[in-house]
Amino acid sequence: MEAIKFISDGCRILSDLHHQQTETRKKFITPCLDKTFLQVVDQSERDNTLFGNNLSDKIKASKVITMQGQQIKKTSSTPKPSSSHVHTAHTSRNSLQGNWQTLPRSQANKGGRGGYKRNSQRQTPSSQQKMASLSEYRAAKRQ
């Protein structure tokens, strides 16, 4: 009985080693293959050869399926929308774009004082102008 256990363990080790070597050989070969056949090769099971005896038949079938898929894509084309429809959608979208014409959701300063002030000019004030307006605000607040 002991001898059978040793023989069984030896066979398991050999079969595991054979499986690991087979997987390593597959991993060395697959990067060199064409990407279109990679899925076919990955799905094939090993028998007498590394990728199966009928690998050439599977590759031919894959080529035929790819060609038929391309023919189907060429024949079915989506109709283009009319130019008037595109123009109206484009103009209505342009008029609603942006949020600069409405009041902001929160107030400009977090203290709740002041609010949204719209200038006639769209230029940002310089740092000196900001400091001057801040000092004027503080002076008015003290009075």
Image (cartoon, rainbow, N blue to C red):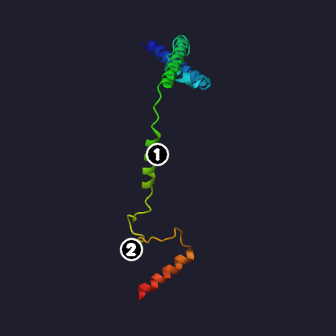
**Measured from the top left, where is residue 99 in percent x and y?**
43, 59
Q: Amino acid at mark 2?
A: Gly
Residue of label 1 = 87
Relative to the observer, which residue lies in front, 57 or 71? 71
Evaluate whether residue 16 shows in this view: no
Residue at the image point whose x is 56% and y is 74% from the top? 127
Residue of label 2 = 111
Relative to the observer, which residue lies in front, 76 or 4? 76
Q: Residue furthest bottom?
A: 143
Q: Locate residue 38: give its quadrant.
A: top right
Q: Amino acid at mark 1?
A: His
As drawn, 20 above or below 139: above
**Quick one: quadrant of the C terminus?**
bottom left
Determine crowd level at label 2: few under 14, some 14-19, many 20+ residues with C-alpha closer than 10 A: few
Q: Residue furthest right?
A: 32
State yes or no: discs 1 and 2 in contact (Cβ < 8 Å). no
Determine crowd level at label 1: few under 14, some 14-19, many 20+ residues with C-alpha closer than 10 A: few
**Measured from the top left, where is residue 91 in percent x and y?**
45, 50
As drawn, 60 above or below 135: above
**Quick one: quadrant of the N terminus?**
top left
Residue at the image point whose x is 49% and y is 15% from the top? 11
Q: Secondary structure at mark 1?
A: helix
Residue at the image point whose x is 43% and y is 46% from the top? 88
